[in-house]
Image: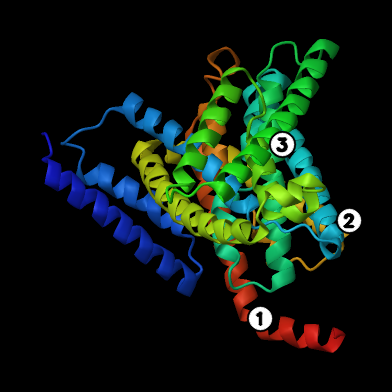
Amino acid sequence: MALGTYTIIILLSTVVIVSYLFSLFSKKTNIPSVLLLIATGIAIKQFSAHLWYNEPAVNKLVKILGAVGIIMIILEAALDLKITRQKVKLIRDSFSSALFIFLFSALGIGVLVMQWLDVPFENSFLYAVPMSIISSAIVIPSTSHLPEDKKDFIIYESSFSDIIGILVFNYMIMKNILSLKSAMIFGGNVLLAVVISILATVLMIYILTKSRIHVKFFLLFAVLSLIYSLGEMIHLPSLLIVLVFGLVFNNTSLFTFGPMKRWLDQENIESTLLFMRSITAETSFLIRTFFFILFGYSINLQVLILPDVWQLGSLIIVILLFARFLYLRLILKTNLFPELFLMPRGLVTILLFYSIPMEKSLGSFNSGILFFVVAVSSLLMMIGLLLFKENKAEYHDKSEEVI
């Protein structure tokens, strides 16, 4: 059954409006809007099963939206990361947290999958990497009501988790990963990506601040998307380009010196930065909306009743929780609430899962496990935020005593 042009416009507009209402509802209740979007996708599939469903086409759309979404989300996070001397400890703690928890989780899940499915560790570790990445796309919008120190820690940690996870994934899909040659090629690619990003950043900042035309953001986004896509095609860690661009743009005073300061109009940079933050947030919201609805639409609910799905999925969640508890309590020695539960898996996890090459894929790994981990980790985040909301007054009282 074909849908008319205006019917499609009405449906798309309704989806955006519903997503906005979900965001408002999420702020009031701490129920992650991603769960509501996924549930909406599942419901749409159930009610429209007789209309049209093409699994390869839906999966392709999920991949495309995921690739665009990841650029926007990393850019959005980078534009919020202000580097100052006062934040050096915060940056160090959040990076070490992201690195330790990622490695511990990936190794633990890799061993679990290897033993459970009786597969080589290299393949099981590749599947473990996406599930070990905290979703900045989900957790950052959920931190708005947290105290500044906790909010900053989560923003930095989830952003670093995205970058570390994607870099490790890019390395794992290479051939002969244990050889010195592969390690040197990957290291060279990282260095090349950083050099390209610095050059592209300086050039784009100059163009954006000097250009008199008003259509700036989508020019920037087109250039970043072009560089990202070309980089991915030649196996460069091109997400670094997006991250470095955002960091340099948001901290131009740290990265510009000599004649560069005279070329760049700092006042114009600040006004452009404010505009970019607004547009990036709006675009990220739009992409997340359609991505998670399409992801929900692609889910086969019947797989969730399979024992392997909920048993293996539950063990993976236990490993993720234990890794966070171990680092936050025993190494960082910080308060566990709500940080222990702020570990949702989302867009990056799904995108990388769909990007696993055929030659390294595991036919015995049920994709329902991925949905289980995404859903349960989001529910745990909701519980953590609700627990923190109940103890918020107590937290403030203790903070005032310390002051």
Of 273 and 141, nearer the camera is 273
Does residue 93 appear in this view? yes
Which residue is labeled 3 in the image? 198
Q: Residues within 10 Å of mark 2 (few under 14, many from 20)?
A: few
Q: Residues within 10 Å of mark 1 (few under 14, many from 20)?
A: some
Mark 1: secondary structure: helix
Which residue is labeled 2 in the image? 331
Q: State whether residue 260 is above or below residue 192.
A: below
Indicate left or right for 335 with 116 as reference. Answer: right
Between discs 2 and 1, the one toward the N terminus: 2
**Which labelled disc corresponds to residue 76?**
none
Residue type beneath disc 3: Ile
Residue at 84% x, 88% y: name it.
401
Quadrant that contains the C terminus = bottom right
Residue type beneath disc 2: Ile
Between label 2 and label 3, give the one nearer the viewer: 3
Q: How many marks?
A: 3
Of 333 and 275, nearer the camera is 275
Residue type beneath disc 1: Lys
The image quadrant of residue 61 is top left
Between label 3 and label 1, give the one nearer the viewer: 3
User: Spatial distance from mark 3 to mark 1, Cα to Cα?
Assistant: 42 Å
**Which labelled disc corresponds to residue 392?**
1
Between discs 3 and 1, the one toward the N terminus: 3
**Relative image position of residue 106 (x, y in whole percent):** 72, 36
**Relative image position of residue 344 (x, y in whole percent):** 59, 52
Quadrant that contains the N terminus = top left
**Relative image position of residue 154 (x, y in whole percent):** 69, 59
Residue at 70% x, 22% y: name it.
172
Does residue 344 appear in this view? no
Circle 2/circle 1 CB separation < 8 Å? no
